[in-house]
Image (tube, helix red, strand yellow):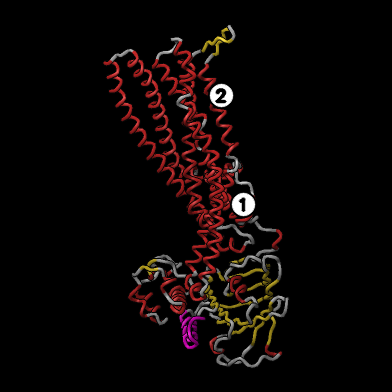
Amino acid sequence: MSYSSAESDARPAGMNWRIARRLAAIVGGFWHGQSKRLAWSFTLGLTGFLILRLFVDVGFNQWNRWFFDAIGNRDTMEAGRAVGVLLLLVASAAAVGVGIVWTRETLQVRWREWCTGTLLDRWIGDQRFLRMTRVENGLANPEYRISDDVRLAIEPLTDFAIGIFTALLAASIFIGVLWHVGGALTVSIAGASITIPAFMVIGAVIYGVSVSCLVPIVGRRLGAATAARNESEALFRARTIQLRESAESIALTKAESHERTRLAGIYEGLVGNWLAMVRQHCNVTWVMNANSALIPTVPIVMALPKYMAGGLTLGEMMQLASAFVQVQLAISWLTDNYRQVAEWFASARRVVELADALDDLDRPDPNEGLHNRMIVHGGESLTLGALMLADRDGRKIIETGHATFRSGERVMITGDMGAGKNVLARAILGFWPWGSGYLSVPAGYEAVIAHAAPYLPEGVLEEAIQCPAPTGTFPPEEIAGALNLCGLSHLVGRLPQKARWMQTLSADEKQRCAIARLLLQKPGVIVLEDALSACDAGAQAELTRLVFERCKASVIIDISNRPGPAHLYDRTFVLTRSGDEPGKLEEVTRTGATSRLRPKRKSDVVTIKA
């Protein structure tokens, strides 16, 4: 299964409850495992504060009856006492409100922390972030989904749970108030007396259900419009990030106008999706604003006949009006939060798509054939076992047959452009997922690649040089020594500095930093893939010799478009490809440790066979 932004827009994005169930399965782990004590502590604390707030609301409802009856009876002393109690109720409401805010927002932060950490572990783990880019029509903007959509899917859930919990409790209590205080209403129609039992309860339910049914009808497209808006926002953000990351290349190519036109087209689509969402929001607002204006008036109009007939006091009528509003808030919870629910569904859907895409990466696809198998054993060699590498459609790229490289060997692999050298390099590192055969490495060995565009993380230079080893693995003097050997003595004084080194250093400097990293780490298997392409010929030879001398126990495979100095290598291979046939790895033999490559004769070429 794969996802793209276009496919996402094509699928229904409304109130799909499968999304809600799937999201619950994804994020519900917060209440299990190591985080469960924290999760349940804040959940129960929040529940307790919500119950206290309901008691305060009931107190305000009783206060309404007390105060307005005192006014109706012109009892100044009783009204004064009611004002004193009001101050106590207000203080209680404020204290409970602080408790709710603290427990709710802390729960949201901790829940998001757990969910983000879980998705990051899955996305970065097992190189899924890399594998996801190789999937045709791959999922769009996974980083946006983790950074923003997780927050937009998690935070409202807490608010929704609070709203629903409060609505159910409030409805159960205040319907009782309507029933007990309102009683029955007797009306005369055509000379006949008709008694309506619990008339305030019946009126509140009919009114609330009518409004709640009307909102989803007029706003049925709001969820889809919101999802399209979110997708467009993510696409626009991703394109602007690409513009910043490729700023120099775009400027040197003078492609600014092209990029501006492309961004304008993307933003035009974003504006269109925003306006579509605005139109749907306006439809919902018609009903919601009318409902807000009617709610305070409807209960008074309903209770007025009984009040005029002397069946209710002024305080009782105001108590009924207050209870009616509380019941409507409970019944019309979906009405009042319809837009928020629609936006939540849009973000929840994107998080679910990300989780599903990560699950799919771990599922073998029967249409992609056998996958390469990394087998770790305790031998002394790196072995390619009849390795056949293919693309995602199953077309063969390379057939290596069987090849063994022993510790300390220096191997050159060269070949024409497009012969598949980069594919072979990634297969040796275990990064290429399509093909068959196996790759074995000595037990405990780490395979590392140094390529033309090495990665230096943002931060302290001393830490960037050591990456991916933990900070402090190598002492500062050892790091300084490696930089000096690689011609980077001018960076020694900058080791404690923080910077964005990918933008600060030149291509030549970044490649030399990668070589310094190899000198420090001395991994068991080193793959050099055009690792010094930005350096001049003399520096390439010197730095290559330096790696060979300092990493004596490593298997070093140098993959390049051009053969290096013959005397540096124990074995040289040529990757050849003819037409649509898969590339073949051939070994070119040499005589003597310092001999140069002779012109290739039939006797000099050995095809590695299974």
Looking at the picture, does residue 380 appear above or below residue 603?
above
Position of the N terminus by quadrant: bottom right
**Quadrant of the rendered image containing residue 279:** top right
Looking at the picture, does residue 605 appear above or below residue 331?
below
Tell me the residue that label 2 is attached to: 206
User: Which segment is the magenta one?
Assistant: 533-550
Q: Residues within 10 Å of mark 1 (few under 14, many from 20)?
A: some
Q: Earlier in the sequence, mark 1 or mark 2?
A: 1
Relative horizontal placement of residue 556, taking residue 81 as reference (left or right): right
Q: Give the number of marks.
A: 2
Q: Residue furthest top?
A: 191
Q: Amino acid at mark 1?
A: Asp
Q: CA distance from mark 1 to mark 2?
A: 37 Å
Which residue occupies the foreground of this view, 456 or 230?
230
The percent coordinates of residue 406 (x first, y second) are 58, 78
Which residue occupies the foreground of this view, 8 or 318?
318
The percent coordinates of residue 49 (x first, y second) are 39, 33
Position of the C terminus by quadrant: bottom right
Q: Amino acid at mark 2?
A: Ile
Looking at the picture, does residue 139 appear above or below residue 454?
above
Tell me which residue sits at (41%, 28%) in the image.
Answer: 54
Which dot marks residue 9? 1
**Quadrant of the rendered image containing residue 133:** bottom right
Tell me which residue sits at (34%, 75%) in the image.
Answer: 477
